[in-house]
Image: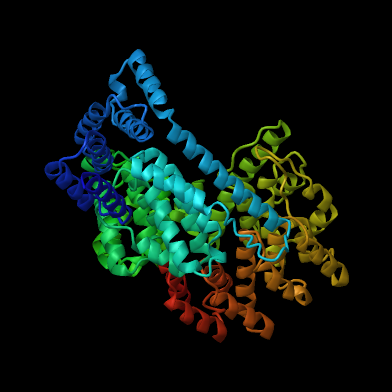
Amino acid sequence: MKEATAASGVLLACALRRIEQNQIALDVLDRIVDVAELGPVDYGWILIQRARIRDDMGDLSGARDDAVAALRTLAGDEDDLTVSALASAATWQLFATADHAALDQEELQSSFAGLLTASDTAVSWWRSQTLAWGLNGSHSDWFRSWAEETTPGFAGSGDTGTDHFFAAELGADLSGEHSNWKAMSSHAARHHLMGAVNTGQESSEIVKRLDALRRSGDHRLVELTFGRLRRNGPLDSVITAVDKIPVNGWTHTTADSNFDALAVAGDLLWEDKANEHLTRCVELVADSVEFTEQLRPSGFVPIFAFKAATGLLPAVGRNAHNAVAELIAEQPNPLIRLPTSDLTTAIGLLEFDLVSERNKEALWELGNREEEALGAAALGWLAANHHVEALTELKVRAASGDLHALAAIGDVSALGGTEAASLIRRLEEMVEQKTAAARKASHSFGGFDVGRSLTLLNLCFPNEARWSSCLELLCESTVAWRDKRSACLLIAELKRDLPQEVRDTIVERIEDIATADAGVWLSVQMGGVCTALSIALGALSGDDADSAAVALASGSPVEREDLATLLGSSHCPTQQPILAALVNDPNPLTRRKASMAVGRLASTGTSETIQRLAWELANRDGTWMPSGLLAGLAYDKSPRSPIGPSGVEIAQFLQRHGSGHVRRISRRLLQ
């Protein structure tokens, strides 16, 4: 009877932990310790389970007391297989909760040596072997699927390893070996996620496994997995999984995962739940000392919390928007130290109509106070919403050579001729410096694309244009492809504003333009930009242009992306049906470009085939294709060229989408 009490108590506690009812699980174990008269091994078992929960909830002192008591009561039975696993769990608990900074080198080495010795048990060897069997079975199934196995009964789902993963995870859970349980739980969740489509219950299976992956604490994979399924669907499963994240009751294991899941997919929550999460995140940005001391997340909590708040912004209401706006307006705050890139991203997601006049004024003051990227982003947000003084300030800064201000302006046609001339001269110097550096094999890791910026200003302000340095950059073979590619695509897009002599030079030297250096990257990825340039500038036309475009369809992912962009610009109209294949391309960026191309073409309402494809994309699962379609519909939108009736209907339809981000884009398009 005593043994049954211990076993049932551990099973119940493990089950409660899996639904994140840690306090109730702790109460169950407390009750057993206080009331039941258990044998030494069962008593140690209960203490170890209680230690892992106490540790996860932030009670390090209680966790260490339980681990020490467990080792004491298990002493003398180390040859027992069960005892060896429990002793290993207790030793790990002591090591994980130790203050390593207070130990000298010898003490730390001794502690680690003791951990290795205690962890080397028959149970750990069995678990490793079981995991290896599972991985081998899964690898075999996936290889046979790749090889297009047609033997009757072959599922091709990576299904063989299921029992092995479950056995390894359950064993680690019941023995209280928390770090091993986290690893096994992550393996099992990933295995099931990749085979969910073959289960016949894909949606519910994905919910279970997303929840398990998040609870395992494997937060980097949480970010990847939630992001992938948010893009491609099934979206209902991700919505349900994100909704299962509790507002409170986070643990040491789940804290990082919860932050990352909200940052990636927080826009899928309904407004009330999103508001609760965002309020909590803003509180943690302002004061995270207690949270950090208790749960010990892997990084700086205010940064994690602010990223999560940013992910939630498209789904929240007025009060939450104002809370974030107020937080941003207080920057730079030396007590918070949020990264500028995170702040500028959040500014772009603020809904102007939901931000109070007081906070708009505070952001205006921030823009005037800060002269780098943060100030420019605040001014750019205001200028985009018809704040005349903000636009004037940005133009003054841009004319003085502030590239952050130039980027924040958005539409460079707002600049005057004098301002543009000043900027063109500044950019010309920077382009010449970049070309000279490339000839010395010196390349940067990115940053502001001066070649594209100079090209844009040259195209928009022909009277002030200075093309020689730009052409020199494009035709120089030692220049990195990243420093050429965007400028080439821009010329192909805006070729109508290109002077004839520049057009002739580009056509004549197209092979030189196609030759580029890898720079700091592993390979050259110029893609199909030179084909796009040749077609856009008329060097290729008719059947030759169609043949060159079709050739891109069987090329690299980047070439297929460029083909989608080319077709979206209304070139090679007879080849537009290729977009139906590109929206199903294996490469997500190609699919995205293709959906944007369909949106651009659909906005004119000229082709019945494109209109049908646009509606098919609007009904696609996930956020990637509908948002790409909307971006395409908005691409050429201006007061003089509003979207057509079909585009309006699509935007109205997507107002009911499950993603706050998609709803936001469609709402702005309709405005």
Taking the image as shown, residue 27 lies to the left or right of residue 470, namely: left
Q: Is residue 199 left or right of residue 480?
A: left
Quadrant holding the C terminus: bottom left
Picture quarter containing residue 54? top left
Which residue corresponds to the image point at 46% horizontal and 57% vertical from the top-left? 226
Check the image and report above or below for 138 versus 660: above
Q: Which of the 4 image quadrants contains residue 194?
A: bottom right
Q: Residue furthest top?
A: 106
The type of colouring in the image is rainbow
> Total of numbered circles in the picture?
0
Residue 120 seen anywhere in this rendered image of the structure: yes
Residue 387, horizontal then vertical, whole percent: 37, 64
Identity of the residue drawn at 55% across and 63% down: 413
Q: Residue at x 38, y 17 (%)?
A: 109
Q: Is residue 122 above or below residue 621?
A: above
Answer yes or no: is residue 234 visible.
Answer: no
427 or 284: which is nearer to us? 284
Q: Residue furthest left?
A: 35
**Can you name the residue that lies furthest to the right here?**
543
Query: Does 515 sit left or right of 328 as displayed?
Result: right
Nearer to me, 49 or 259: 49
Give the image location of residue 407, x and y in percent.
51, 53
In this view, which residue lies farthest toward the front? 1
Q: Nearer the viewer, residue 329 or 632?
A: 632
* Image x and y of residue 408, in percent: 47, 55
- Splitting the image into 4 quarters, where does residue 90 fall? top left
Residue 567: x percent and y percent? Answer: 71, 70
Query: Which residue corresponds to the image point at 86% horizontal and 72% vertical from the top-left?
Result: 542
Q: Judge by depth and name the residue closer to the eye, 521 or 32.
A: 32
